[in-house]
Amino acid sequence: MLTKGSKAYSIIKMKCPRCHEGDVFFDANPYHFSQFGKMHERCPHCDLKYDMEPGFFLGAMYVSYGMAVAIALPSALIISALVDGLRIYQTVGIVLIEIIVLMPILYYLSRSIWLNIFFGYKK
């Protein structure tokens, strides 16, 4: 599953979707805020241009939204099932804190997923 040549490898390791060698981001740790979101313009290994056109990564916003909903709904259900006596606003507050903490990871993963939608692996 996480072998070179699979989309999962490229997405999780945040590698170039074409060659799986070059890094997409300068720093793969989304919690290093001094380098947060800084992407290479092109793959350092195969020279693939990541940003095909202005606004290309706008679609990654929808991917990030989908992942946030996929995390928030089960979390809210689990929290309300495990903890008796919580009001709805308390459950929503806990889930919002969870999403805010995970936001940097969602940002990086959504851009990596978006790139992998448009580019395939080539040896």
Image (spheres, rainbow, N blue to C red):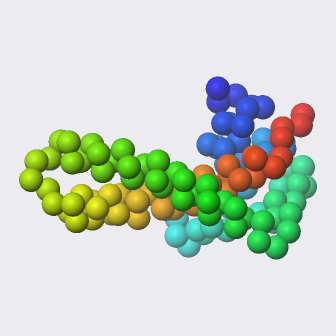
Along the line of sight, the residue nearer the viewer: 38 or 62: 62
Residue at the spot x=9%, y=53% of the render?
Answer: 85
User: Is 34 on the left or on the right of 8, as rendered?
Assistant: left
Residue at the spot x=78%, y=41% of the render?
Answer: 20
Residue 57 x, y percent position in the rendering = 72, 65
Residue 101 x, y percent position in the rendering = 40, 61
User: Is 34 on the left or on the right of 85, as rendered?
Assistant: right
Extreme-front residue of the structure: 88
Residue at the spot x=47%, y=48% of the render?
Answer: 70
Residue 109 x, y percent position in the rendering = 60, 52
The image quadrant of residue 110 is: bottom right
The image quadrant of residue 55 is: bottom right
Along the line of sight, the residue nearer the viewer: 96 or 48: 96
* Numbered disc total: 0
User: Is 25 on the left or on the right of 65, as rendered?
Assistant: right
Residue 86 x, y percent position in the rendering = 14, 56
The image quadrant of residue 10 is: top right
Q: Is residue 101 visible?
A: no
Extreme-left residue of the structure: 85
Residue at the spot x=20%, y=42% of the render?
Answer: 81
Along the line of sight, the residue nearer the viewer: 39 or 74: 74
Position of the N terminus, as image quadrant, is top right
Q: Is residue 85 visible?
A: yes
Position of the C terminus, as image quadrant, is top right
